[in-house]
Image (tube, coloured by chain):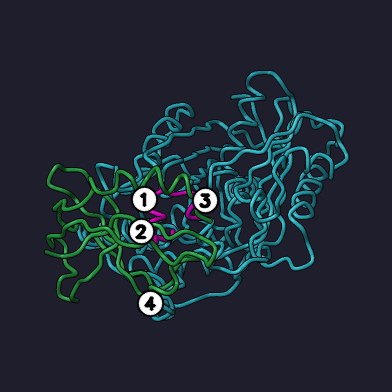
Chain colours: A green, B cyan
Amino acid sequence: MTNTIASWRKTKELHKELGRVGKIVVWTRIYVAPAGFQQQVPYVVAIVAFDDKEKRTLQLVDYDEEQLTVGQKVITVIRRVGFPGKEDIITYGVKVKPV
Amino acid sequence: MNVHIAGAAVTKFGEHWTKTLIDLATDAASEAIKDAAVSLKDIEGVFVGNMLSGTLQRQEHLGAAVTSALGINKSAFKIEGACASGGLAVHLAIQSLLAGTYETVLVVGVEKMTDFPPEEISSLLMRAGSEEEREAGLTFPALYALLAKAHMQEFGTTREHMAHVAVKNHYHASLNSKAQFPFEVSIEKVLNSSKVTDPFTLLDSSPITDGAAALVLTAKKSSSKKKVSIIASTVVTDTIAISDRASLTELAATKNAAKKAFSLAGVSPKDIDIMEVHDCFTIAELLAMEDLGFCKKGEGGAYVASGATRLGGKKPVNTSGGLKACGHPVGATGVKQLVEIYDQLLGRGGKKQVTKAKVGLTQNIGGTGATAVVHILKV
């Protein structure tokens, strides 16, 4: 269940998150997903350390297998989050892809 | 602290098709009251540890729901702190006794989870994490998998090290008639069971469980020779998101709660004979051994593999079977841990009885260590 107002509040600042560069600290590949993410399995989630030292936990997309390494350089992109129900609005969030 | 346990009980952990959440809570409560040889009218306050009754059973207002089912009109509270809900309920019940508000109280930890599809439960359990972690499609196994991989990267911890936790706890559960999975597994079976999230397989993970546990706590002077006192109860929090922490190879909340508890109780790790720790995933028990001070940071894997924490070893850990094999009804777990230590200290541990245990410790975690609750018990 996605709340429209909460989604709007979040999305209007989302563009500020684009194009940040960081490195993978640790990653895992998920085979058993929670509701709303099952269509995506298997998918990779990583803890990323950005150049300003902030760490974030984000999904990794558009990667090749050999890029799944600690220290891999990544950049933030905006992507759809999970698979919403038929009555839900589509939400967007930050993910990272290798550079 | 002049607080002791007067009675304790735990329901069978597993799938209870014929019982409701309230049935489980009252079953455990009634048995604990009987065990304490007190009557319902002696209970002045009821502290209920539970995480998901509002969503799963559509029952908020759980404190009054439990007292109504018990047929008493007393003070009642629901305490929520994810998988640490039970431990927090025990902590607050103790505070009410120390404050002198009540003299005898009941703590009930309860969760009813198996009526629902696992992916729904997995998603609901993620409410214990941060918004960003939910958005990344993380699960609790995956969050602990990130901690496991960080530990493997930094200290060379292996899959086999972690598998030893599951093998040991299944062995303990095989001796516990209340356990959800009372059978043994081999290292190979753990390593080769179905993949959940890299590096964990199904057998690295605690299950979805129904169950309840209850304690009667009192500040009244006891005439019995053998009484179990609670000599420390501490709660410490940390950031809700693991990415906001300085270290990914420790749970700082466990370290800090343990430090406070040892200082309150005037004991040190060497005095602890037996423990129930929060092994929601195999890595969590390795982290607990290190963060509670039973081995050096990075040596948790070797410590567990040495057999020291197996029944018959120097410091048996999770003789109930732990969350892994006894089961993990999330609100009940933190209470069940004290029930197990209580039974062991009184010598009524059955087939899994530890010899000569005098001092025991429990460690209950909410989320990925955003809440840690530590208790120390002594006979």
Image quadrant in which you'd find residue A30: bottom left
Q: Which residue is mark 2?
A: B136
* Residue at the (52%, 37%) spot, across then down: B376
Whether residue B125 can be seen here: yes
Q: Chain of mark 1?
A: B
Alpha carbon separation for disc pair 2 and 4: 26 Å
Characterize the local packing of mark 2: few (<14), some (14-19) or many (20 or more) Cα atoms within 10 angstroms. many
Pick whichever, B195 or B325, lies toward us. B195
User: Considering only vertical position in the picture, is A93 above or below A6?
Assistant: below
Pick whichever, B357 or B49, lies toward us. B49
Q: Quadrant of the C terminus of chain A?
A: bottom left
User: Considering only vertical position in the picture, is A42 above or below A26?
Assistant: below
Alpha carbon separation for disc pair 1 and 4: 30 Å
Q: Nearer the viewer, mark 4 or mark 3?
A: 4
Alpha carbon separation for disc pair 4 and 3: 24 Å
Q: Chain of mark 4?
A: B
Q: Which residue is mark 3?
A: B276
Q: Would you say B147 lies left or right of B335 here?
A: left
Pick whichever, A10 or B121, lies toward us. A10
State the count of labels. Answer: 4
CB under 8 Å between callouts 2 and 1?
yes
Q: Which residue is mark 1?
A: B132
**Which stretch did the figure color magenta?**
B125-140
Q: Would you say B265 lies left or right of B305 here?
A: right
CB under 8 Å between callouts 2 and 3?
no
Three-letter residue code for mark 2: Ala
Three-letter residue code for mark 3: Glu
x, y (%) of residue B23? 79, 54
